[in-house]
Image (tube, helix red, strand yellow):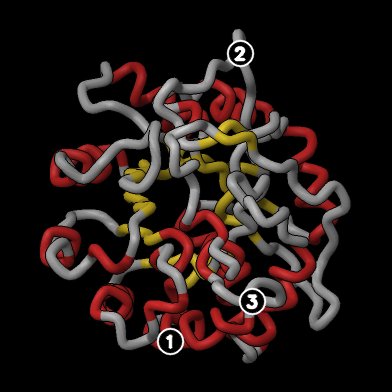
Amino acid sequence: MWMGEIRMADPMGAIRDCPAPDPHPGGPTRYAVPPGAVDTHAHVIGSGPAYPLVADRSYTPPEAPAQKYLAMLDATGMANGVLVQVSVHGTDNRLMLETLAANPDRLRGIAVIPLGLPDRDLAALKQAGVAGLRLNVLFGGGVGLDQVEAYGALAREMGWHLQFLIDARTLPPLASRLSRLPVPFVVDHMGHMPTSAGLDDPGFATLVDLVRDGAWVKLSGAFRTSVQGPPYADTIPFARALNEAAPERCLWGSDWPHVAAWDGPPRIATLLDLMAEWVPDEDRRRMLFVENPRTLYGFG
């Protein structure tokens, strides 16, 4: 059974080495990527001693340098990208910030930070192109939900949004807290739950309600949530339900370099072709690829 990132850690607690991403990315074969498209979810990853990995990580990835990510954008027809601070670097955002600074027109970033940073550090993050903060409640190296209200207040002050890596099955008791946040928020990877949970799962139903009421959602991570494997047909009804709820708040992300893809890295062309099934309408696909992300992340 295919389970993607849902089964990240070794049952004995060992930190596993990740496979490398597909070295030959390509664009979709079923439609043309529209001009101005944005990949809203990817990571750059370094290694020690220059960019050490956190000790409490769930996996050890290969390096994923900026030049390889930019080459992937070119190969898939993406005009812009959004880098999300990867959990294995914890709150050390240096590599991401250096990459943003080198590509100010093409890239934006989502940082992971502790509360209480000096104003000068927050200003530097914004100047570098950071557009939001990520709270990762699933894997080692992230920042959890204990102080979500404080992060919401900080994001409001800075003109940022919040982004959550969370299993949708845990959403029902959290929904009211999230709904009261004073800033927009994004849920990663369609709620990061296995398709075997079903469309009627209370957590997924809660996610659909949140999206309908104002949340944003990334239609991404098929290889993480599918239990069937490529071409991930079991993810189609989940993506369609979320897109029907709010086509104006759906985003696409490659999730490059596909960390913890234990069954082998997905082909990005396959993930992009899947969008023809997830969002069959061409106008809605343009919204998802172009209009929605350019609005949320502030691309010109």
163 displayed left or right of 222: left
Cβ atoms under marks 3 and 1 closer than 8 Å: no
| Type of the residue with mark 3 | Tyr
Q: Earlier in the sequence, mark 3 or mark 1?
A: 3
Q: Earlier in the sequence, mark 3 or mark 2?
A: 2
- Alpha carbon distance from label 1 to label 2: 42 Å
**Residue at x 47% of width, y 29% of height:** 127
Cβ atoms under marks 3 and 2 closer than 8 Å: no
- Whether residue 160 is visible, yes or no, is no
Q: Element type at marker 2?
A: loop
Where is the N terminus found, in terms of image quarters? bottom right
The residue lying toward the viewer, choosing from 233 and 178, is 233
The residue lying toward the viewer, choosing from 200 and 71, is 200
| Type of the residue with mark 1 | Ala
Q: Element type at marker 1?
A: helix
Residue 17 occupies which quadrant of the picture? Answer: top right
According to the picture, the residue beneath numbered tag 2 turns out to be: 48
**Residue at x 36% of width, y 19% of height:** 121
According to the picture, the residue beneath numbered tag 3 turns out to be: 232
**Residue at x 55% of width, y 73% of height:** 227
Image label count: 3
| Type of the residue with mark 2 | Gly
Q: Position of residue 92 (x, y in %)?
A: 45, 21
Residue 196 occupies which quadrant of the picture? Answer: bottom left
Q: Position of residue 75 (x, y in %)?
A: 85, 55
Q: Which mark is residue 241?
A: 1
5 displayed left or right of 257: left
Q: Badge 1, how many Cα within 10 Å: few under 14, some, many 20+?
A: some
Q: Earlier in the sequence, mark 1 or mark 2?
A: 2
Q: Element type at marker 3?
A: loop
Q: Badge 2, how many Cα within 10 Å: few under 14, some, many 20+?
A: few
219 displayed left or right of 65: left
